[in-house]
Image (tube, rainbow, N blue to C red):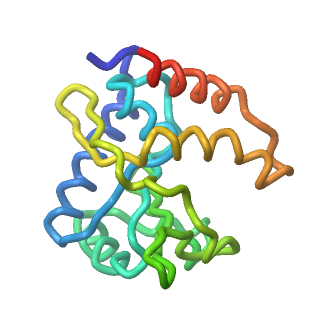
Amino acid sequence: MYGRRVDGLTERQLASVDEVVEVAAAVGVEVWLRGGWAMDFHLGRVTRPHVDVDWYCWRADVERLASSLIGRGWRPDLRMPVGVQLDLFRGDVEVSFAYLARDAAGRVKVGAGPWAGTPLPAGMLDGPPGRIGPHTAPVISVAAQIEFKEMFPVWMPEHPRRPKDADDVARLRASLIA
């Protein structure tokens, strides 16, 4: 069901996904997985270990989401810059929420940080929910996942393409053919 041997951290990260989805629904906040966990939820299996769990949420909703998660024992990660995204941890599990906003035409854009206002891929939030075993979560579209992993070293040349990103792109492309 999980694809690879699942360790304790992976189990705790999966539990955090369930918790974020539950809390977000309870307070009326939309969230979407991004990064490696978005890929795994799309594929329906854990493909590799993950350092953290990356999400998107609307900038306008972050205070409600943060308050609810902090009320459940999550703590702000003081190592991270304030205002760019919401970074929380509990024990050895880290979650981050990059902010989304809309432009005057209603298009999704980066909601904060040095790239605030930059348009994001059309249809990015229109993908179906993903699932790993009993765990279900909203995920960004496969096309957006591929674009981000391919473009990251172009957008940020100081960060060369990582082998795991090339592997992820291959997995995502293969899933579109299968």
Residue 103 on image: x %, y % = 51, 80
Residue 172 on image: x %, y % = 51, 27
Q: From the viewer's perspective, is residue 74 above or below residue 123?
A: below
Tell me the residue at 53%/74% (across/down).
111
Report whether 116 appears left or right of 137: right
Tell me the residue at 85%/51% (across/down).
158
Q: From the viewer's perspective, is residue 24 above or below residue 19?
A: below
Check the picture and name the quadrant holding the N terminus: top left
Q: From the viewer's perspective, is residue 32 above or below residue 41?
A: below
Report whether 134 appears left or right of 129: left
89 or 106, nearer to the observer: 106
Tell me the residue at 26%/33% (across/down).
131
Dividing the picture into quarters, in which one does residue 83 lie? Answer: bottom right
Tell me the residue at 77%/54% (across/down).
155
Residue occupying the far bottom of the picture: 104
Dividing the picture into quarters, in which one does residue 23 lie? Answer: bottom left
Report whether 151 appears left or right of 127: right
87 or 44, nearer to the observer: 44
Residue 143 on image: x %, y % = 51, 41
Dividing the picture into quarters, in which one does residue 42 lie? Answer: top left
102 or 163, nearer to the observer: 102
Residue occupying the far right of the picture: 158
96 or 143, nearer to the observer: 143
Check the picture and name the quadrant holding the C terminus: top left
Residue 151 on image: x %, y % = 71, 46
